[in-house]
Amino acid sequence: MFCMQFVSTTNNKHDFDVSFSTVNTILNGHNVILSYFLQIIFIPLQAIPLLEFNQPTGQTVAMGDAVTLLLEVQIPVSTTTSYSLIVKAPFSTTAIFKVCSVEIQTIGENMPCVHKEDKKTVYSSRDLTSSSPEPDMATLDLGGITNLNLNSSTAASTIVFEITIAPLNHTAAVDSSFHNVEVTLNYAGTSTVDQTSSIQIVGTSVLTTSVSVSYGSF
């Protein structure tokens, strides 16, 4: 609240008219400034998408197997924004895990114009040394998404992704070791939301256990 006092040095009524006019101008100006800052602070917070692994920790995988992670992305209601999803598998000079696939599992009913068959995942590698690097990154360009706010449930505004990764023959991929999968959601041009999921390597798959076969002489 603003408290202002004006003292006139004359008996001219016009002085007071000007003063009160000035007060109104100042107060209106402050209202405009306050409204502007409220828009900066609160509106973007409401329009930030939520990114969460289901489940964020406790996932395990055996050497020779693959594990599928579920990523839930909640799109803000009554918005239209472009999105792209980047997945990074554990990496150290070369890939510790490879990205097998990144696919859309379900799309909430608030986004009827989004069709998963139209979305193609591009796989790439950060490995600059190997002659045949494994894909340790994936990018899924989702394009523009409009949330029509037809249903107030969380599921209606959520897109669920399936991310399947597998450990590779790497010095860091050992029994009981922990590794993080990183995802970044780019939206509205330059904004990002990040999330990680921890995976533990536990044992070796029976499917990859080498078997020695002896052949008798004929």
Image: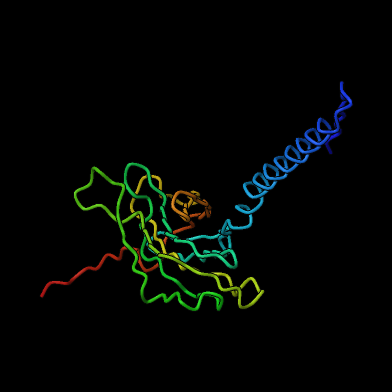
| Quadrant hosting residue 117 | bottom left
- Say which residue appears at 35% left-offset and 57% top-offset: 98
Instruction: For residue 114, say whether it is visible.
Output: yes
The outermost residue toward the top is 9
Tell how many labels: 0
Left or right: residue 11 versus residue 19 is: right
- Say which residue appears at 10% left-offset and 75% top-offset: 218
Residue in front for this viewpoint, 168 or 192: 192
Q: Is residue 14 above or below residue 190?
A: above
The image shows residue 107 at horizontal and vertical percentages of 51, 75
The image shows residue 187 at horizontal and vertical percentages of 47, 56
Residue in front for this viewpoint, 206 or 75: 75
Instruction: For residue 57, say whether it is visible.
Output: no
The outermost residue toward the left is 218
Q: Quadrant of the N terminus?
A: top right
Left or right: residue 35 versus residue 108 is: right
